Image (cartoon, rainbow, N blue to C red):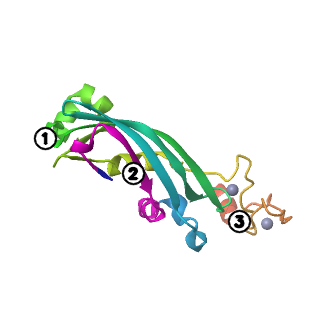
Amino acid sequence: MKVPLQKLPGHRSFELSVEYIDSLTKGLPMRTILGKEAGEAGQASAEVDFYVNEEQIIGTGQLDGWVELGCSRCLSNLRHTLSESITACFIPKAKLPSEEEAELDDEFTSDSEDTYGYEDDEIDMEPVLRERILLAIPYAPLCSEDCLGLCTVCGGNRNNSECGCDRKVIDPRLAALRNIKV
Ligand SMILES: [Zn+2]
Ligand SMILES: [Zn+2]
């Protein structure tokens, strides 16, 4: 996802393959929750306009696509839509403040999130798109706002059928905990 500086300013498209999204989301709890039910991890594309201001490169655009996640209540597969705006500022790597300097300089820290370094006469959009996607993944995704979740007694998916279990019964292990005096 590298763009040579001599090709800028201009418009660029980036395709994020199923394999790329897979490597990005591997190990995230909302992915691993799917186990062997996991399908294609997702797909996305980004359209970005680049502007050049002396040695500063500004990229603005839009990323659209989807990622497959597991519902945090019923564990079933869902497609989470990605529709994210992108803003990134690239400056020469040598001019990026070191971590210590950035900590001292509040002004830089406040807008450093969108600032990336470049070297070798090319900018790399990969870290920008990676961060944008990871930030867009909800911590506790839901297949629908009113997902009923799994039955705490039999483990069945209550969205598919009502199993009729009596869920008012307190788990004996929890009941024992309640009797502990603190
Ligand atoms: Zn659900
Ligand atoms: Zn049940």
| Mark found first going from the N terminus, 3 or 2 | 2
Is residue 10 or residue 161 the one in the foreground? Answer: 10
The amino acid sitting under disc 3 is Pro
Distance from Cα at disc 2 to Cα at disc 1: 23 Å
Q: Give amino acid for label 2.
A: Arg
Q: Is residue 10 magenta?
A: yes
User: Viewer-nearest of labels 3 and 2?
Assistant: 2
Most extreme residue toward the bottom, as rendered?
Answer: 36
Q: How many marks overall?
A: 3
Q: Where is 181 relative to 108, above or below? A: below
Q: Which mark is residue 94?
A: 1
Instruction: Give the camera-side residue of 124 and 71.
Output: 124
What is the quadrant of residue 24 in the picture?
A: bottom left
At 26% across and 44% down in the image, what residue appears?
Answer: 7
Which numbered disc flags the more N-terminal residue, 3 or 1? 1
Provide the residue span drawn in magenta.
3-27
Disc nearer the start of the sequence (2/1): 1
Image disc number at residue 172: 3
Cβ–Cβ below 8 Å for labels 3 and 2? no
**What residue type is disc 1 on?**
Ala
| Residue ID at (25%, 29%) | 108
Q: Considering the numbered disc 1 on the image, is that residue within a helix, a strand or a loop? A: helix
The residue most toward the top is 107
Residue occupied by mark 2: 130
Say if mark 2 contacts mark 1, CB within 8 Å. Answer: no
Please state if 141 lies on the left or on the right of 45 as rendered. right
- How packed mark 3 is, by other alpha carbons closer than 10 Å (few <14, some 14-19, many 20 or more), is few
